[in-house]
Every structure is written in structure tokens, then in C-alpha cells.
Amino acid sequence: MSDEELYRRSVAGDEDAFTALYRRHQGAVYRYALRMSGAEAVAEEVTQEVFLLLIRDPDRFRAELGALPAFLIGVARRFVLRRFERDGRQVALEDEPEAQATAGPSQDFERRNQIEAVRSAVSGLPVRYREVVVLCGLGETSYEDAARALGCPVGTVRSRLNRARALLKAKLEGGRQRTRCVA
């Protein structure tokens, strides 16, 4: 069934349809909130609030304005931004489970350092740039869906992503240059 059909049935009280929608989209909402906030507890809370909104205020989603996944990410975005405003700070990204290393200890150490440098660089971006990196770069969201979720034109998404990539490149290259100078 399509998202729209599941949503229509869910609004009519079909719990199985709501469960199917939740299972289909909760992972993407959670990953977005986790990558934006850097905290599992925040991601869990945001994910719960997004789906509670679907239950409490079903008229908020209007299919003629865009796809359900873009709507859900847009709602998650608002909850994450409110959390940033309320807490007055942004938390660092937590460690994610890493794949088994097949290289030796020195390569594994270097890989972990590179991953941490990227995480740090992404979490240090201004929110308007971080969210396009999370959506389009890490979340594989189309520019069009990202634009709907962020409430801006597609061109703005593209320019923010381009600027974010330039900022990340500068941060990561700057970190390597400092490391080389020290060594």
C-alpha cells in the first residue's frame, strides 16, 4: 500500500495501517534526529513526538503539499530545532557501532580518527548547513524532498549543500594540516 493509503486508513482508526507507516518511516526519522542532535535520547524523543503528532493532529499532513516522508522529516526538524533552542546548546555526535576492522591496529586507529574528525566537522556546522548534509548527504533524501522538509526552494538546498561541503572540506583539511605540523 502507498503511504497515502496507509495514512488515510490510519486516520480512519486502522491501527495496523498506523503500525505499517511507523515501521516504514521511523528509521529515517530517528536517523535524521540522531544525526542532527547527536544524542540517542533526543532522537528517540523526537521520533516519538513526530508519530504522536500524526495521531493527535491528523489534518496536519496534506498530500497535495508533498510526500509523507518529507512531511515527517519536516516535523522532526522542527522538534530538533526547538530542542536546540530549549537546551541552548548542541551536543556532540555519539559514537555509532563501527564495522569490524580487517586492517591492523594502526589502520583501525587512523580510521577511527578520520570518522571522529568527520563527525566533529559535521556537528560543528551551522544548523542550516548540517541539516542539508544530514538529509542529502547522509540520509539520501532527494533535493526536492529536502526542500519540502526544510520549507525552502530546491536551489537553496543545493546552495546550502555546496557551501556545507566547502566548509567541511576546509575543516577537515585544516585538521590534517595541524596534525602534520605537530608530527
Image (cartoon, rainbow, N blue to C red):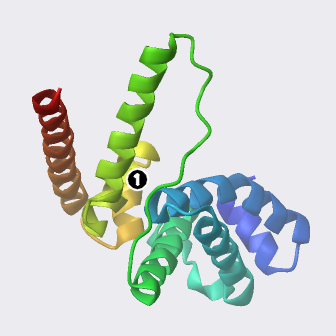
The residue wearing badge 1 is: 134
Q: Crowdedness of circle 1 by 10 Å Cα count: few (<14), some, many (20+)? A: many
Quadrant placement of the C terminus: top left
Kind of element beneath mark 1? helix
Which of the 4 image quarters holds residue 49?
Answer: bottom right
| Foreground pick, 143 / 139 | 139
At which x and y percent is residue 94?
Answer: 53, 53
| Foreground pick, 29 / 115 | 115
From the viewer's perspective, is 1 left or right of 15?
left
In the displayed structure, would residue 143 be above or below residue 62? above
In the displayed structure, would residue 117 be above or below residue 147? above
At which x and y percent is residue 77?
Answer: 46, 72
Q: How many marks?
A: 1
From the viewer's perspective, is 82 left or right of 5?
left
Furthest residue toward front = 183
| Foreground pick, 5 / 139 | 139
At which x and y percent is residue 2?
Answer: 69, 55
Point 40% across, 86% down: residue: 85
